[in-house]
């Protein structure tokens, strides 16, 4: 068996009974398993009380930060024990580094990395949730004011920006919205078919898919896809702009970031969400038809007629109206999170995550509120 | 040195002595930071090589190149600290990755490195919570984490007030004296150049090559290149026929 020989040597000498001299030799590198100061103090404690601690590093051949941390520990312990210390025996560079490390006293920042007690955590969570709700509401208010400015023809933004955002969140989203809606229509029809077939009511699969898609699923799925795709992109764009002080530059020029950045995004989604929802409704119904015609053996005209009979104009418009509200939610939450973002890479990532989570929660909650209101109104 | 077919600098050749403070200077766009990127292994030169103690960096095997990289510490212009980590975690990461030290030993080393740059007590702060000058100093602490043989500084004084800039120069001088490390500094700040440089190289953006190498004070007084004298005297001495 081979043993790794240690590179460093340590010995405590007593030139006089009241002085302890820490004699160091060999290589003192941090990777060599250096001792901590405990051995030195145990050795010192075996003799008579010591009043002074000195060093002799004349036989040290190499050293790095490892020697400095060892010396720092010994010197701190000596101070705690009210023992004088003399570092003149340490290598010249090490003495200079010790002086440099001690040149600026440790700042008492009150930051210890401890978790506050649970009650304090609940309290701070509640206050931050309240502040969060208030900021969302005030941002919504500012958004409505910006829309008002637009209607009065006073909003300042570039039409080209609006067109770029429209292109990004309209035509470019058709692929993903179409794919998701088609699959959802397919799954709805498949699950419905298995149940309805038992009662010989397979044809009602068309009703199930048509009503679900137009009234609920079409607009909800589109909103969720858009919050993941476009809301997160808004948050990341505005977060990065915030990091680069681009938003500050707009504000100091007297250009409202709300009008210049948020309004085009909100308008684009208000315009595109209903169109995407109508598209999602049709593609979803098509997905259902594929199952109806292949799995259940229904005729295509039969399926179309059944669907026409099932969908009321009210259901269709309810879905489309909800999509406008969801568009406002996705745009405002994405922009708000971006503008609230801290000025670092991690903060921009958090802003994008938070934009998606907040939008999805709000979309589901608002859909629930719609359901209750429409039920009371008799729709 | 080139970006695609656009040559930034050519025919650059110099030797840096051990323990020396070497300054790369030149006007904006002359390729100072690009040269630094070649030296620290971020960009391969279009032609030529960088040698450390005679060992080729760019022709070395990957493993050998990684070993050479660990001998270098780089302090970036804006600190380049990882924003999701505290200052202590930033300094600790290279120690955790490349050494077998215990968590306690790493904590002690991190405290020492932060104390050396005057940031004792700021261990638990995130980069977004400290000032620009503190970020730069924390970047220096991180660069020093593995006790590198060569420390590189990219524009250490940029964006700092004169006093903080002077303190950073003093820190570079003090670290060189105590660590016995070699320092390579990219800067165009004249007070810094005169305060810290043993040797300096001047990169010219027009001729796209180095036109002066030597002690900056000597270059200021004796360089045959009017452009170099003009640069080192802030244009107070005429640049002759040059623009």
Image: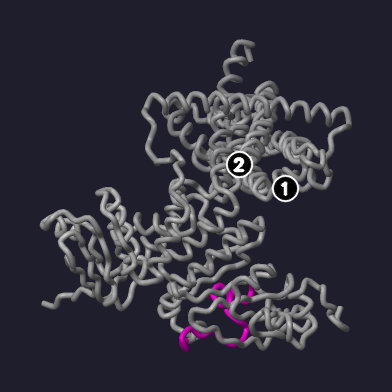
Mark 1 and mark 2 residues within 8 Å of each other at the beta carbon:
no
Residue A284 lies, in percent from the top left, at: 60, 38
Residue corresponding to mark 2 = A341
Regarding residue A178, the answer to whether it shows in the image is: no
Crowd tier of the residue under label 2, counting other residues whose Cα lies within 10 Å: few below 14, some 14–19, many 20 or above: many
Residue located at (48% from left, 75% from top):
B150
The mark nearer the N terminus, 1 or 2, is 1
Residue B63 lies, in percent from the top left, at: 40, 78
Residue A353 lies, in percent from the top left, at: 54, 42
Residue located at (52% from left, 56% from top):
B81
* Closer to the camera in the image, A240 or B217: B217
The answer to if B68 sits in the magenta stretch is no
Residue A61 lies, in percent from the top left, at: 30, 78
Q: Is residue A123 above or below residue A236?
A: above
Residue corresponding to mark 1 = A246
The part of the chain drawn in magenta is B33-55
User: SS at mark 2?
Assistant: loop
Give the position of the N terminus of chain B as an image quadrant. Answer: bottom right
Q: Which mark is residue B7?
A: none
Q: Quadrant of residue A115?
A: top left
Q: Is residue B107 above or below residue A124?
A: below
A149 on left or right of B25: right
The answer to if B40 sits in the magenta stretch is yes
* Closer to the camera in the image, A334 or B59: B59
* Closer to the camera in the image, A246 or A74: A74
User: SS at mark 1?
Assistant: helix
Residue located at (25% from left, 66% from top):
A33
Tell which subunit mark 1 falls on. Answer: A
Give the position of the C terminus of chain B as an image quadrant. Answer: bottom right
């Amino acid at each position: 068996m081979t043993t790794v020989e240690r590179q460093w040597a340590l010995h405590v000498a007593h030139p006089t009974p009241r002085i302890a001299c820490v004699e160091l030799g060999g290589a003192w590198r941090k990777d060599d398993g250096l001792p901590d100061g405990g051995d030195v103090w145990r050795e010192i404690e075996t003799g008579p009380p010591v009043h002074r601690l000195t060093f002799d590093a004349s036989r040290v051949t190499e050293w790095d930060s490892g020697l400095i941390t060892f010396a720092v520990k010994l010197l701190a312990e000596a101070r705690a024990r009210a023992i004088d210390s003399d570092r003149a025996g340490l290598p010249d560079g090490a003495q200079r580094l010790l002086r440099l490390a001690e040149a600026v006293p440790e700042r008492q920042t009150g930051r210890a990395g401890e978790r506050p007690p649970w009650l304090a955590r609940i309290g701070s969570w509640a206050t931050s949730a309240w502040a969060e709700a208030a900021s969302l509401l005030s941002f919504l208010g500012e958004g409505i004011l910006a829309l008002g400015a637009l209607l009065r023809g006073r909003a300042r933004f570039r039409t080209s920006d609006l067109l770029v955002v429209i292109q990004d969140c309209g035509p470019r989203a058709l692929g993903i919205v179409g794919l998701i809606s088609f699959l959802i229509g397919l799954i709805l029809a498949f699950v419905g078919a298995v149940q309805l077939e038992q009662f010989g009511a397979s044809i009602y699969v068309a009703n199930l898919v048509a009503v679900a898609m137009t009234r609920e699923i079409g607009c909800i799925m589109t909103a969720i896809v858009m919050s993941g795709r476009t809301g997160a992109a808004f948050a990341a764009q505005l977060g990065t702009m915030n990091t680069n002080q681009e938003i500050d530059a707009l504000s100091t020029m007297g250009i409202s970031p709300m009008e210049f950045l948020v309004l085009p995004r909100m308008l684009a989604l208000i315009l595109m969400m209903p169109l995407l929802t109508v598209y999602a409704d049709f593609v979803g119904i098509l997905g259902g038809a594929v199952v109806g015609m292949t799995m259940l053996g229904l005729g295509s005209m039969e399926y179309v007629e059944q669907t026409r009979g099932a969908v009321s104009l009210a259901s269709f418009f309810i879905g489309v109206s909800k999509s406008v509200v969801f568009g406002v939610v996705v745009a405002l939450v994405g922009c708000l999170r971006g503008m609230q973002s801290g000025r670092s890479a991690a903060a921009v990532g958090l802003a994008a995550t938070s934009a998606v989570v907040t939008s999805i929660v709000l979309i589901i909650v608002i859909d629930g509120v719609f359901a209750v209101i429409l039920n009371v109104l008799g729709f | 040195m080139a970006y695609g077919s656009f040559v930034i600098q050519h025919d650059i050749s110099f030797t840096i002595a051990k323990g020396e403070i070497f300054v790369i200077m030149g006007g904006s766009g002359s390729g100072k930071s690009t040269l630094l990127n070649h030296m620290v292994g971020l960009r391969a030169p279009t032609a030529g090589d960088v040698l450390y103690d005679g060992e080729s960096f760019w022709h070395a095997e990957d493993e050998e190149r990684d070993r050479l990289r660990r001998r270098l510490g780089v302090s970036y212009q804006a600190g380049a600290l990882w924003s999701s980590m505290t200052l202590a975690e930033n300094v600790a990461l290279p120690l955790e990755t490349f050494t077998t030290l215990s968590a306690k030993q790493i904590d002690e080393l991190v405290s020492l490195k932060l104390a050396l740059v005057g940031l004792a007590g700021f261990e638990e702060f995130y980069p977004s919570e400290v000032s620009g000058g503190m970020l730069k100093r924390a970047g220096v602490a991180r660069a020093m984490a593995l006790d590198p043989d060569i420390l590189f500084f990219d524009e250490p004084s940029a964006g700092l007030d004169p006093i903080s800039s002077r303190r950073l120069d003093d820190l570079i001088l003090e670290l060189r004296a105590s660590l016995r490390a070699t320092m390579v500094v990219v800067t165009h700040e004249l007070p810094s150049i005169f305060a810290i440089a043993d040797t300096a190289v001047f990169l010219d953006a027009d001729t796209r090559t180095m036109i002066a190498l030597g002690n900056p004070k000597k270059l200021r007084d004796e360089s045959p290149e009017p452009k170099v004298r003009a640069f080192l005297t802030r244009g107070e001495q005429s640049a002759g026929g040059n623009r």
